[in-house]
């Protein structure tokens, strides 16, 4: 609330925990939701999502390369937002956001190169199906304002939404064992539609739509508690429409 200062205390020591605005590298600069990093994320999501959604298993080498890149980049992004200190990665917020973007991009390139090798086709296929299952679960979680399971004032229930996403990932990973081709087609369709939806939403709502939802689910950084709990997650109607539509498109494209 305006005029109030929120203090977060350590449960063990009682010492105050420094609080900063939660960011995923998308460029939350001086309250603005649109910035150069935001545009880069949107363009990258579209460039990666379109081939995955259209090509599927037809261009298997491209698919496995992109899948490997996405798996490593996603893991790197989660690691960064959860371990970054209140001072960020650089002296300025804008530079810190840019570094998050560059590090995540570098991880994607490394994963893409590794995923292109024939010897790693099976692990990469499993990663794609895991991401496909996760993308469906994530959309189900962030579709509702406050998330599917509200985390609570002290984030005590935040893990439930992560468990739901993990269950989707597990289901996707197991599906490749029993229905390899079908699960790959469905997973690439799910990932492609998710990334295209993210690209559209970033251009429409900046860091206030799907991006905010992703941070609300995966950001467990104590330095971001005041922001995540205080401001919560209230996606605009346009963001909810984009998320819901992407799920329908993934299903229709699959069949």
Image (spheres, rainbow, N blue to C red):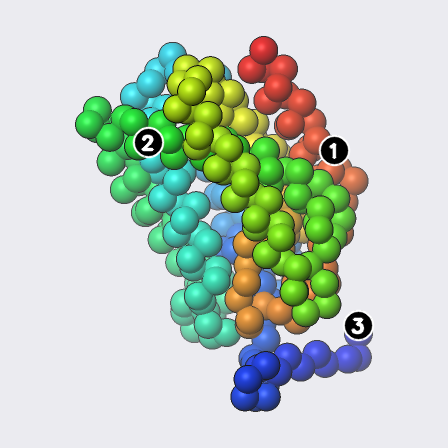
Q: Which residue is mark 3?
A: 1
The picture quadrant where one finds residue 123 is top left
Expressed as whole percent of the image width and height from the top left, the position of residue 45 reads 49, 36
Dot in front, 3 or 2: 2
Helix, strand or loop status at disc 3: loop
The picture quadrant where one finds residue 29 is bottom right
Helix, strand or loop status at disc 2: helix
| Label 2 Cα crowd, 10 Å radius (few <14 / some 14-19 / many 20+) | many
Foreground residue among 188 and 55? 188
Q: Which residue is mark 1?
A: 241
Residue 201 visible to the viewer: no
Instruction: Locate the C terminus by quadrant.
Output: top right
User: In percent of the image, x 63 and y 15: which residue is there?
Assistant: 252
The picture quadrant where one finds residue 199 is top right
Dot in front, 2 or 1: 2
Q: Earlier in the sequence, mark 3 or mark 2?
A: 3
Most extreme residue toward the front is: 178
Foreground residue among 173 and 84? 173
Distance, label 1 to label 3, CA atoms, is 28 Å
Q: Is residue 249 left or right of residue 152?
A: left
Instruction: Locate the N terminus by quadrant.
Output: bottom right
Q: Is residue 125 above or below residue 89?
A: above
Distance, label 3 to label 2, CA atoms, is 46 Å
Q: Is residue 131 above or below residue 183?
A: below
Q: Is residue 69 left or right of residue 54?
A: left
Q: Which residue is mark 2?
A: 124
Q: Is residue 196 left or right of residue 131?
A: right
Q: Is residue 126 above or below residue 161?
A: above
């Amino acid at each position: 609330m305006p005029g109030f200062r929120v203090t977060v205390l350590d449960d063990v020591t009682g010492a105050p925990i420094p609080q900063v605005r939660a960011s995923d590298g998308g460029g939350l600069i001086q309250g603005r939701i649109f910035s150069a990093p935001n545009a880069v994320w949107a363009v990258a999501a579209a460039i990666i999502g379109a081939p995955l959604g259209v090509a599927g298993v037809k261009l298997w080498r491209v698919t496995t390369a992109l899948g490997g890149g996405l798996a490593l980049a996603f893991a790197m992004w989660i690691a960064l937002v959860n371990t970054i200190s209140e001072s960020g990665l650089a002296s300025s917020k804008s530079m810190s956001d840019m570094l998050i973007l560059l590090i995540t991009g570098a991880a994607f390139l490394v994963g893409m190169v590794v995923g292109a090798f024939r010897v790693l086709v099976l692990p990469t296929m499993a990663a794609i199906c895991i991401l496909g299952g996760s993308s469906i679960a994530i959309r189900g979680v962030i579709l509702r304002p406050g998330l599917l399971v509200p985390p609570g004032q002290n984030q005590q229930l935040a893990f439930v939404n992560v468990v739901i996403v993990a269950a989707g990932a597990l289901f996707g990973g197991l599906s490749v064992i029993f229905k390899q081709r079908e699960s790959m087609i469905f997973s690439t369709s799910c990932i492609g539609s998710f990334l295209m939806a993210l690209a559209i939403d970033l251009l429409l709502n900046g860091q206030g739509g799907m991006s905010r939802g992703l941070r609300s689910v995966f950001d467990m950084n104590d330095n971001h508690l005041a922001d995540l709990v205080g401001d919560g997650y209230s996606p605009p109607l346009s963001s909810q429409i984009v998320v819901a539509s992407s799920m329908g498109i993934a299903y229709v494209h699959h069949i």
